[in-house]
Image (cartoon, rainbow, N blue to C red):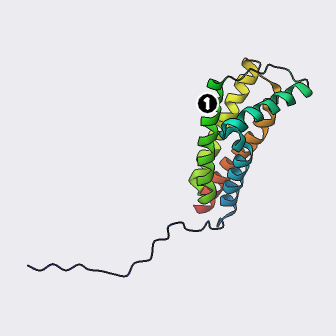
Amino acid sequence: MKTTTNRTLATPVVANPPIEAPSSPYSRIVRASAIYDVLVTFPFALPGLAAWNISQIIALHDSLALTGSTPHFAPFHLFFVNLMGSIVMIWSALRIYKPEPLFGLFDGIARMLFSSWMLYYLLVHNVSGVLWFFIVPESIWGVVQLYGYRAGRREAI
């Protein structure tokens, strides 16, 4: 018995498809939040830069005479800083490459969690007031993405 293979012309697979412009205002918000994350998080992802970045944050705390305390970072602490920075960089790359609404929803949820944890440590454990410089934009991005996702869902109905 002879078998034949049905061969049809297929669309060629592009190894690295180009990054497309977001198709909706909400997708532009998702991409913009990811670009913000890259700018803020990149120094935390690399060992040498993380230590320098933390020293700059501590210097800001000292120069503004903020309340709360700043810890000494040992290599063990920096490992977790680098780990978190690396994860955020990968998550950001995904949202830059493919700024889908579902990613914006999950990012908005994560931002609200991060903001809550920062606020908790600020209020309960008396960490440096420099956290306000992180809480405010994190919360704004979270609210904008959650509201944008909800508004987009209402328009789709």
Q: Is 138 above or below relative to 125?
A: below
Query: Which residue is label 1 attached to?
Result: 80
Q: Which x, y percent locates residue 152? A: 63, 58
Residues 43 and 19: in front is: 43
The amino acid sitting under disc 1 is Phe
The answer to whether residue 61 is left or right of residue 39 is right
Indicate the quadrant where residue 88 lies: top right
Q: Which residue is drawn at 70% across and 62% down?
A: 25
The x, y position of residue 11, in whole percent, is 44, 77
- Answer with the quarter of the image where residue 143 lies: top right
Q: Look at 65% across and 32% down and name the residue there.
A: 81
Q: Which residue is drawn at 65% across and 25% down?
A: 75
Secondary element type, mark 1: helix
In the picture provided, is 66 more to the left or to the right than 152? right
Number of on-image labels: 1
Q: Is residue 55 above or below residue 30?
A: above
Q: Residues within 10 Å of mark 1 (few under 14, many from 20)?
A: few
Picture layout, residue 96 above or below residue 1: above
